[in-house]
Image (cartoon, grey):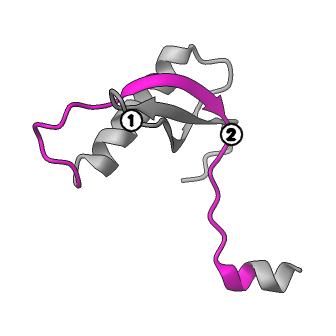
């Protein structure tokens, strides 16, 4: 929903024990918000998205670091049109 309120995009790097790190995101939080606000938003999004896939007894991965920015996926046909 577009509200006209400025927002800051964040992603996160997570890691399960003895596994490679992976990038997850994107969530929007208010600019200047404490890191805990972005962490909470990412944790909620992780639970919403991955909670539907992972069994309930799988522990959640450790948050390694917050990454400012947005993950974008562009369909291949749009990439060709832009070239």
Residue that appears at 65% across and 46% down: 70
| Dominant secondary-structure state across the stretch colored magenta | loop
Task: State the CA–CA distance, disc 1 to disc 2.
Answer: 24 Å
Residue 30 vertical placement versus 55 (above, below) = above
Q: Quadrant of residue 46?
A: top left
Q: Residue furthest front?
A: 18
Identify the element where label 1 is drawn.
loop
- The residues colored magenta run 53-78
Tell me if 28 is positioned left or right of 61 in this view.
right
Residue that appears at 27% across and 31% down: 60
Residue receiving disc 1: 19
Residue that appears at 70% across and 36% down: 6
Residue 61 vertical placement versus 49 (above, below) = above
- Residue 67 drawn in magenta: yes
Q: Earlier in the sequence, mark 1 or mark 2?
A: 1
Q: Quadrant of residue 67?
A: top right
Q: Which mark is residue 76?
A: none
State which quarter of the image contains the C terminus: bottom right
Identify the element where label 2 is drawn.
loop
Residue 10 is situated, as x and y percent measured from the top left of the image, at 60, 35
Residue receiving disc 2: 69
């Amino acid at each position: 929903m577009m509200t006209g309120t400025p927002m800051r995009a964040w992603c996160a790097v997570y890691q399960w024990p003895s596994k490679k790190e992976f990038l997850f995101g994107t969530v929007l939080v208010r600019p200047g918000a404490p890191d805990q606000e972005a962490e909470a938003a990412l944790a909620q999004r992780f639970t919403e998205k991955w909670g539907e896939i992972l069994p309930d007894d799988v522990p959640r991965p450790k948050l390694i670091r917050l990454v400012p920015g947005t993950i974008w996926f562009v369909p291949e046909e749009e990439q060709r049109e832009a070239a």
